[in-house]
Image (spheres, rainbow, N blue to C red):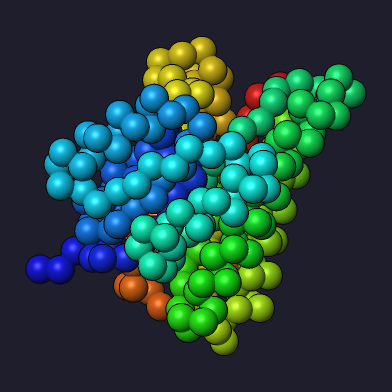
Amino acid sequence: MAKRLENKVCIITGGTSGIGRACTEAFVREGAKVVFVGRREERGREIESQLRANGADVLYVKGDLQQIEDCENVVRACVEKYGTVDVLMNNAGFGTFKPMIEYDMVKDYEEVMNLNLRAYFILIKECLKVMVPNGKGNIINLASIGGITGMPMQVSYAASKGGVIQLTRTIAVEYSKKGIRANTISPGLTITELVEAGSEVEKLLQSIVPGGNSGTAEGVANAAVFCASDETPFMTGANIVIDGGVTCGPCAPIF
């Protein structure tokens, strides 16, 4: 039986930790050739070696995606290695946690926007240069429920993720006739290095989840594999929400 992503060439940003690493591993298991990106070179090389030892066809690219040239280099490296790009998975991102009035406009606003939204835009633009002539392509952007509902103390993060959702919808409409699909995944509370299992932060966030539980990076990765596959060719412009029901109705405020 053929694997779901057999021989697809995929770029995954933020691929050395959390959801990005889970996506890298899941895509490889399903037969994809993966170019994964991260800033921490030692960790990236270690993951690359581990995956190759298990037979995976992968390439690690060091990159700070707040830098325009690094975004462009990722796509260039992928094309040089594999000749094409079939799937782009934009995942890298971060946020700060403080009242808006205390924001530093560089660290708390510009850097968040540059990584969470501008980098997505640049990477999509560069990948479209490859995908459009091919007449096919698949773009998956990681957003957040913060792009759907208000997130106190995380205004720049929430604004960037709202931008990602609208960016994705617009790409879906603009490039549908070119054979390009674009979809968003919006996780809620997810256990990663940023929110450790059993931590006080997790317990606080679980208080607004109807089931009082948490999502996993692997669960999000499964959704990403689904989006990257050819199983739903009519799905574009969608936003898959993985939040345990938080955005379905009223919930207790955190703050």
Question: What residue is rendered at 38% in x and 32% in y?
Answer: 44
Which residue sits furthest front? Answer: 80
Q: Indicate the position of residue 136 as horizontal and vertical percent values.
A: 45, 78
Is residue 151 found left or right of 93 in the rendered image? right
Q: Quadrant of the N terminus?
A: bottom left
Q: Is residue 74 depicted above or below 244 in this figure?
A: below
Q: Is residue 179 depicted above or below 232 in this figure?
A: below
Q: Indicate the position of residue 65 as horizontal and vertical percent values.
A: 61, 42
Question: What residue is rendered at 44% in x and 42% in y?
Answer: 61
Q: Indicate the position of residue 157 as horizontal and vertical percent values.
A: 70, 37
Is residue 157 found left or right of 75 in the rendered image? right
| Front in this rendered view, residue 39 or 253 | 39
Q: Quadrant of the C terminus?
A: top right
Residue 161 visible to the viewer: no
Q: Indicate the position of residue 217 as horizontal and vertical percent values.
A: 39, 38
Which residue sits furthest top? Answer: 200
| Front in this rendered view, residue 191 or 203 | 191
Q: Within the image, what quadrant is residue 112 found in?
A: top right
